[in-house]
Every structure is written in C-alpha cells, then in structure tokens.
Amino acid sequence: MSDTLPMFPLNAVLFPGVTLPLHVFEERYRALVEHLLTIEDPAERVFGSVAIREGYEVGDHGAQSLFRIGCRMQLTEVATNPDGSFEVVVVGIDRIQLDALDGRGPFPVGEVQDLPEPSVAVPDHVVERARATFSAYRLAVTEFRPDPYDGTLPRDAEYLSWTLAACAPLPMSERQSLLEANDAEERLTLVTDLLRSELQAMNVIPSLPATEVARNRWSPN
C-alpha cells in the first residue's frame, strides 16, 4: 500500500541500520525537522530519503532527478543552533520506493511504498567470502587512510550486507545498486565483487588508492 512521508533527498545513498549525523540549515528541511518535532511519539518521527541522481540539495533549482529506491529514516537526536539550524542524528529503518514527490508545501512530501527485505538463507561461503574480502580491503587501505570501519563485523547475513554496503567507500551508482539488491545474498555477492575490483585497482596503481577515486562525501543540504 502507498503511504506519504516527508522527504529529504540527499547527495548520498543511505542504508537501513546506519546512523548518520546531518546539519540541517535550508528552510524547507528546517520546516521538515520542526514538523517531526511536533509528533509526540519519537518512534513516529520518520521521513524518507532518496539519493539525488542529478541536481543539488540546496538552491532554487534543487534536485532535478531522484533515484526511486531509498530509505525510511527515524529522527533520533536533535539540537537547535542559535541561527535556527539543526544538528540531527538519524538512523535508517527500511527501504522504500518513491512513486511521486510533491514539493508545493513547506517541505517535500513523497508518495511511497514499503520495500521489505526478503528473508533468505544465505550460504555460509557467501558470508565468509564477503567478510574475508572486506577484511583484506580494510588491511590494504590502512596504508593510505584510517580504517573505514571501527568494530567487529556482524555474522548475521542481512546485517552484514547492510554494514558492508554502508562502509565500502564506493561511488554513488554502486552504492545505489547495493541498496536496490533483491536480498542479502545478492547484496553480499555484489559488494564482494566491488571490493575485489577495488583491491585489484589498488594493486595496479598503489600510489593512488581506489578508495580516493570518485568518492561521495556527505554534503550540506
């Protein structure tokens, strides 16, 4: 069934289970945060986010084209700055599909559908190959930059697939492919192949690690 959600398009792909800090200063997204704060139950302070395919988060023209598959996010922490902007922390809940976007109000509102993650039995060798590949990648990149992941990798296949998707510093198109993967097995297979390509590129051009090429950073709204 379709539902409506406040929408916050970003120049980034977000994933379920991932926590993200955001600096919110543009008027329409300040209005979105103010709206969420009127909701009494903190668990209901949710909005949707999809990645911007073309365009910008800020300015009069804004996003010109959006990806359809995104993430439902929950507002978990809010601090108000003297200038009226916000420092917020959000966490991904689950995937959504954006069917329509209405930007006529004080903040964008989307017509969305739930996109639940299928429950699949992922073979052990797929999980272990993904863990081993990411561990090799972590070791390789520490020669050039800090460890991209601080912690012990989970063993649950679905949680692992989202963790690796979020931690692998890949271009937006590849991150979007990971978000859109049909299930945890497909996502783990894809992220493993992508990271193996990264490792091969780093071996070919050791002075220019692939982790520093075509990377997307969180940009202001």
Image (cartoon, rainbow, N blue to C red):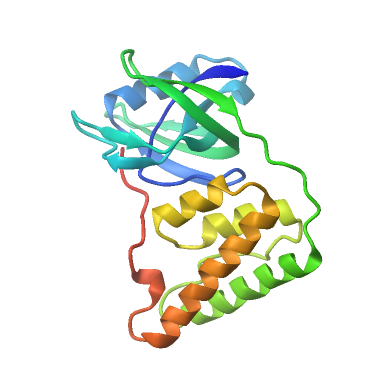
Work out whether residue 191 or residue 163 is closer to the camera in this orientation and state it. Answer: 191
- Residue 167 location in percent, x, y? 53, 60
Q: Is residue 51 above or below residue 130?
A: above
Left or right: residue 145 compared with residue 160? left
Instruction: Name the residue furthest left.
Output: 60
Looking at the picture, how far across and down is residue 156, in whole percent? 76, 56
For the question of whether residue 31 can be seen, the reply is yes
Q: Position of residue 201 (x, y in %)?
A: 42, 79
When the figure is inspected, residue 159 is found, relative to residue 37, above or below; the finding is: below
Screen quadrant of the C terminus: top left
Q: Is residue 157 left or right of residue 79?
A: right
Residue 21: % across, % down: 45, 44
170 sits left or right of 73 in the view = left
Question: Can I make out residue 73 in this image?
Answer: no
Residue at point 48% right, 54% down? 175
Q: Residue at x 68, y 52 (%)?
A: 184
Left or right, 25 with reference to 194: left
The quarter in which the N terminus is drawn is top right
Q: Residue at x 73, y 56 (%)?
A: 157
Front position in the image: 60 or 118: 118
* Residue 86 to residue 124: above or below: above
Q: Residue at x 62, y 33 (%)?
A: 115
Q: Quadrant of residue 129?
A: bottom right
Q: Looking at the picture, does residue 137 appear above or below residue 24?
A: below
